[in-house]
Image (spheres, grey):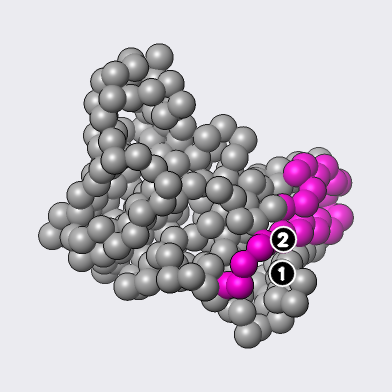
């Protein structure tokens, strides 16, 4: 079963615009991670935010976490055509289960 | 690119057959997790190995089995293949007994069951 749900399912923007993706989850978590996947290949880790953190930055990426609303957002600023990919949030649930639970992803298309 | 490799890249099997997929972890990592990703979906956790022992399992039947070797490489075996087993199979390695910190994914094996 999928814990996280990303919104929107698909997003198309122009190069230079910002892209915002949202993730909601159902259970309490230890951390939440964002991954990127190009064309059905392996996932690339982007950023990890722990449950006691509210915001984190990495280059053009900004992630926020609201544990009271069980939601997170990923902002990509000044997007580039090379950012075109699927983006997944994954949660480390606070259940002792030794696995990440992924959402169904947001497909981002950046038009040059 | 991560240091995680998987083989083969693509595989075509028929229903009822058995398949073995292989994964080589990133150097220094002692935990390997396997995920199944159906088309258009997010990855689903199959199981995890830590220091050669199964360390957690998702909702997959026993015909999905695995091994981890002393060099921390790993195999995923699937018996009695079904059409729904067609998917991208991803392995991920990490250096964490918990196995849920940053994971480094391989490029995946695309399995098609006819």
The x and y percentages for residue B3 are 35, 56
Nearer to the camera, B114 or A39? B114
Q: Which residue is mark 1?
A: A70
> In the orientation shown, which residue stands out farthest toward the bottom?
A52
> In the orientation shown, which residue stands out farthest toward the left?
B70
The quadrant in which the N terminus of chain B is found is bottom left
Q: Residue at x 86, y 46 (%)?
A: A14
For the record, the magenta segment spans A6-29
Q: Which residue is mark 2?
A: A24
Q: Is residue A79 visible?
A: no
Q: Is residue B60 visible?
A: yes
Mark 1 belongs to chain? A
Q: Which mark is first along the chain, 2 or 1?
A: 2
Label pair 1/2, CB-CB below 8 angstroms: yes
Nearer to the camera, A29 or B111? A29
* A19 within the magenta span: yes
């Amino acid at each position: 079963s999928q814990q996280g749900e990303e919104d929107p399912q698909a997003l198309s923007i122009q190069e230079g615009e910002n892209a915002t993706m949202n993730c909601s989850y159902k259970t309490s978590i230890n951390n939440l991670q964002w991954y990127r996947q190009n064309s059905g290949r392996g996932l690339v880790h982007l950023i990890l935010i722990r449950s006691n953190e509210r915001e984190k930055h990495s280059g053009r990426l900004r992630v926020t976490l609201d544990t009271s609303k069980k939601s997170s957002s990923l902002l990509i600023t000044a997007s580039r055509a090379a950012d075109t990919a699927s983006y997944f949030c994954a949660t480390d649930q606070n259940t002792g289960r030794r696995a990440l639970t992924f959402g169904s992803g947001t497909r981002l298309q950046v038009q040059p | 690119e991560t240091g995680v490799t998987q083989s083969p890249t693509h595989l075509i099997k028929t229903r009822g057959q058995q398949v073995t997929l292989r994964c080589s972890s990133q150097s220094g990592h002692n935990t390997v997790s396997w995920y199944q990703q159906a088309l258009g979906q997010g990855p689903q956790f199959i199981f995890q190995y830590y220091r050669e022992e199964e360390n957690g399992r998702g909702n997959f039947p026993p015909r999905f089995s695995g091994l981890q070797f002393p060099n921390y490489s790993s195999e995923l075996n699937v018996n009695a293949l079904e059409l729904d087993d067609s998917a991208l199979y991803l392995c991920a390695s990490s250096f964490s007994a918990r196995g849920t910190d940053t994971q480094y994914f391989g490029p995946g094996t695309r399995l098609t069951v006819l």
